[in-house]
Image (tube, rainbow, N blue to C red):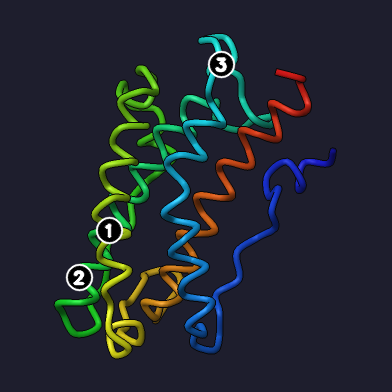
């Protein structure tokens, strides 16, 4: 498989230009709701050697990917809360590649599996209770510009599926 396909196994994310339909919003939230269980299933039975294998050349290890997901989704949860409580807040980015090198990104994956499950329990609870007006609120991303709350939902649904596909794709290629 070519590097592009290894890097983007489900394709690149495209910011939706039109507001998501009610079905589109539900699909995104359902994907986020399923992510913790899907991630746990994706890493089930993997050894430390497997977990410390990069999913692609010059890519993160499976372990780093597992730890990255709650890092990212905790940030997303906070971004959602900012968007719901402030007028067009400018959110902060973070150096995810550097976070992936910190000691907690090299520890046991179980702690991040638990963290993702806990964060998503609240995250999804909140998503499922948004009003029509909430879905249209806007935050400002320093790199992406104005981002509607519904686009944030689409982004993080894609993000979970994207990284889980990195793991399952490597498992399939290696017959693990």
Question: Neighbour class for label 2 at 10 Å: few (<14), some, many (≥20)?
Answer: some
Residue 65 location (% of width, % of height): 49, 34
Q: Which residue is labeled 1 in the image?
A: 77
Q: Is residue 97 above or below residue 31?
A: above
Displayed quadrant of residue 60: top right
Count of marks overlaid on the render? 3
Tell me which numbered mark, 1 or 2, is placed earlier along the sequence: 1
Tell me which numbered mark, 1 or 3, is placed earlier along the sequence: 3
Displayed quadrant of residue 6: top right
Residue at 33%, 76% in the rendered image: 140
Residue 62 location (% of width, % of height): 54, 27
Q: Which residue is labeled 3 in the image?
A: 46
Structural distance between the alpha carbons of marks 1 and 2: 9 Å
Residue at 50%, 57% in the rendered image: 31
Q: Secondary structure at mark 3?
A: loop
Image side of residue 65 versus residue 50, left or right: left
Q: Which residue is labeled 2 in the image?
A: 82
Is disc 1 in contact with disc 2, using a CB cutoff of under 8 Å?
no
Q: Is residue 122 above or below residue 65?
A: below
Question: Neighbour class for label 3 at 10 Å: few (<14), some, many (≥20)?
Answer: few
């Amino acid at each position: 498989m070519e590097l592009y396909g290894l890097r983007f196994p489900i394709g690149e994310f495209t910011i939706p230009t039109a507001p998501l339909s009610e079905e589109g919003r539900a699909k995104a939230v359902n994907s986020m709701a399923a992510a913790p269980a899907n991630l746990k299933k994706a890493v089930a039975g993997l050894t430390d050697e497997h977990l410390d294998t990069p999913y692609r050349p010059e890519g993160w290890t499976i372990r780093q990917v597992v730890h990255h997901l709650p890092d990212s989704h905790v940030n997303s949860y906070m971004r959602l809360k900012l968007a719901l409580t402030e007028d067009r807040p400018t959110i902060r980015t973070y150096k995810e590649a550097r976070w992936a090198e910190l000691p907690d990104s090299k520890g046991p994956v179980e702690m991040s599996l638990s963290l993702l499950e806990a964060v998503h329990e609240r995250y999804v609870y909140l998503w499922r209770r948004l009003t029509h007006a909430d879905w249209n609120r806007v935050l400002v991303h320093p790199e992406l510009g104005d981002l509607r709350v519904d686009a944030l939902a689409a982004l993080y649904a894609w993000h979970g599926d994207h990284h889980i596909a990195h793991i399952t794709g490597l498992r399939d290629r290696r017959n693990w």
